[in-house]
Image: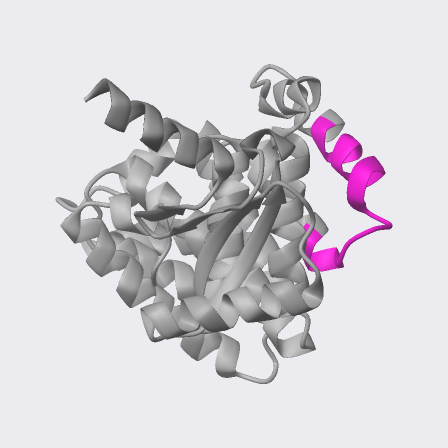
Amino acid sequence: MSSLRATTLRAASREALEAAQGRLDEVLAEQATEPAALGAELYAVVELLSTEIPLRRAVADASSDAASRTRLVRQLLSDKVAESTLQVLDEVVVNRWSSPRELLDGIELLAGSALLARAERDGTLDTVEDELFRAGRLIAGNVELERALSDHAAPAAAKRELIRRLFADKVNTVTVTLLENVITLMRGRGVVFNLDELAERAAVRRQRSVAHVISARALSEEQQRQLAERLQGIYARPIALHVEIDPAIGGGLIVKVGDEVIDGSAAGQLDALRRQLAG
């Protein structure tokens, strides 16, 4: 399961996440499973374990008996979540995680995966991917909004209400649910990072790599198609474009695929010329 945060997990946690993702996929393959409900319940478990630190440590304690950890989770949650959710959590708690925090990260990643599976089932995964990316750009471009959404002291209910006012009638319902949970849980490296991660995971689920493109002006559909084709030729795999408009680059494009940056902007060319002259 490739994602920005998954790659930062230590070895034991990556193995545990891979096993739990496999179980999630099996559960989601069952016709009776509702992915959105499963994702919402997993997010609720993240919220519970975020506040109940002794419980989080207990379910992540690899020195204890795995069956005991499973019983503990089922005793606490069997009347609160569906059996499908419990089956995923069974797989989570029987595996070894590098730390309680990484177990929490893992459940959050699984929750996001379930909701992306809902969008995939609906045929709206590409829409959700684009909406997540654009929401991240909107928040990143508004200092006051980002500050309000990043405020750990602000009530979760107030943040949810703000998200609904901004997005509820403009984007897919899966996008709204993901936005609400990413912002109220406030885990990882911040709101914008987590939204970009979700957008990238949506692209990966569509079996495409992501190219983050900064352009001085809007690109037409034809220009975006041509750019995607050229990048696909360079990287030998399908490429999803996430385009951000920034007039400050002066002209041209800046393209980032993974750790590689192609700077064809006027500002980048001037910087390169200055370095040459200085050298």
Taking the spot 61% from the left edge, 40% from the top edge, the residue there is 136
Whether residue 210 is visible to the viewer of this picture, yes or no, is: yes
Q: Is residue 167 magenta?
A: yes
The image position of residue 204, as x and y in percent, is: 44, 66
Taking the spot 68% from the left edge, 70% from the top edge, the residue there is 124
Q: Is residue 27 magenta?
A: no
Q: Is residue 82 above or below residue 236?
A: above
Which residue is more in the foreground, 53 or 259? 259
Taking the spot 38% from the left edge, 74% from the top edge, the residue there is 233
Taking the spot 28% from the left edge, 37% from the top edge, the residue there is 100
Q: Residue furthest top?
A: 153
Q: Residue furthest left?
A: 63
Q: Is residue 219 above or below residue 273?
A: below
Q: Residue furthest front?
A: 277
Which residue is more in the foreground, 58 or 98? 98
- Bounds of the magenta span? 159-175
All told, the count of numbered labels is 0
Whether residue 79 is visible to the viewer of this picture, yes or no, is: no
By what rule are the colours in the image chosen?
A: one colour
The image position of residue 200, as x and y in percent, is: 47, 56
The image position of residue 260, as x and y in percent, is: 31, 49
User: Quick one: quadrant of the N terminus?
Assistant: bottom left
User: Quick one: quadrant of the C terminus?
Assistant: top left
Q: Is residue 71 above or below residue 135?
A: below
Quarter location, residue 23: bottom left
Which residue is more in the foreground, 190 or 136? 136
Left or right? Give the position of 23 relative to 222. left
The image position of residue 275, as x and y in percent, is: 27, 25
Left or right? Give the position of 170 relative to 143. right
Quarter location, residue 127: bottom right
Q: Mainly helix, strand or loop, the magenta region?
A: helix
Left or right? Give the position of 266 relative to 2. right
